[in-house]
Amino acid sequence: MTQVTVVGIGRMGAPICACLVRAGHQVTASDADPARQAAARAAGAAWEPSAAVAAARCEVLVTVLPGPAEVSAVMGPAVVAALPPGATWIDMTSTSPQAAAEVRGRLAGRPLEAFEAPIGGSPRDAAAAGLRLFVGGDAELIARHRPLLEAVADPAKIVHTGGPGTGYALKLLVNALWFGQAVATAEALLLGRRAGVDLALMREVLADSAAGSAFVRHDLDALFAGDYLESFGLDHICEQLSLVASMADAHGTPHEVADSVRRLYARALDRYGPADGELLAVKLLEERAGLRLRP
């Protein structure tokens, strides 16, 4: 049994808490929003409104937060000072390597350890302990905490990506490519439908062609049913796509396609506000075409 504090009890944090409790760990939950207490209690975790107080009780601190600003706010001087000597911070947030490195630097000079494990998957995957983890950091440290990681993730999907920052980078790239595939596929389907091709036939052919992708094979059914995947907010999607552009600028690599995807999602954010929906940019394309992608 490990004393674990989880900070961030949202869509993913609450089921992660429940998985850790089921695995036999003693879990304390904390969130800036006091309304999240009910979700923490339902998951079987103790509740502590102060992240610093909760951090003082733990061997492992897990943060599951919306983005870099929230990580920076939580991992401030009070929480860092409260962590007991020998504690490990595991950050499961999708953020940029640069922002994370700045926060990780606050641990310098204290006997603390840290690694990143940003998550891939849905709240349903989290509830079933079937998440994918992009784990960056020291291999020995990660191996020591692997049983805890396996409490929330499919063991076959826990990938050690390399040193600090590589997990964050790979998770952002996976997201950027998925969003790009979603809008590119939607554009193709809208054009094909206008040209008189049956949608169901297009899905079948695309899935088994050189243009096939996980989006075509696994996510088009949701779109065809009118589900825009309300598991992530447009504002956070735009933030992540901006982080990809900033990362590319920092490394001197081109990002024209990523910028096009980012601009389209930014227009969707202007249209719908910070609503939940990973495919709301596709909805925007449908509106502009005057056509719904429904078989």
Image (tube, helix red, strand yellow):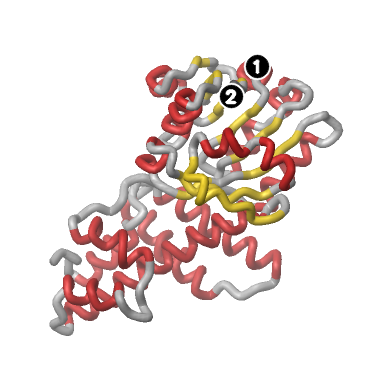
Q: Which residue is mark 1?
A: 57
Q: Nearer the viewer, residue 254 or 42?
A: 42
Quadrant, the C terminus: bottom left
Residue 55 found in image quarter? top right
283 relative to 194 in the view: left or right? right
Query: Image height check: is 224 above or below 102?
Result: below
Q: Earlier in the sequence, mark 1 or mark 2?
A: 2
Residue under the point 35% across and 41% down: 124
Dot 2 lies on which element?
A: strand
Q: Which residue is mark 2?
A: 5
Q: Position of residue 46 (x, y in %)?
A: 50, 15
Spatial separation of the CA atoms under disc 1 and disc 2: 8 Å
* Label of residue 212 in the image: none
Q: Position of residue 23 (x, y in %)?
A: 49, 27
Q: Contact (CB < 8 A) between labels 1 and 2?
A: yes
Q: Nearer the viewer, residue 73 or 156?
A: 156
Say what amino acid the circle numbered 1 marks.
Arg
Residue 73 found in image quarter? top right
26 relative to 126 in the view: left or right? right
Label 2 packing within 10 angstroms: few (<14), some (14-19), many (20+): many
Residue under the point 38% across and 69% down: 213
Quadrant, the N terminus: top right
Say what amino acid the circle numbered 2 marks.
Thr
Label 1 packing within 10 angstroms: few (<14), some (14-19), many (20+): some
Q: Nearer the viewer, residue 204 or 11?
A: 204
Q: Position of residue 105 (x, y in %)?
A: 78, 41
207 relative to 107 in the view: left or right? left
Q: Nearer the viewer, residue 233 or 215?
A: 215
Query: Image height check: is 179 above or below 16?
Result: below
The residue furthest bottom is 195
Dot 1 lies on which element?
A: loop
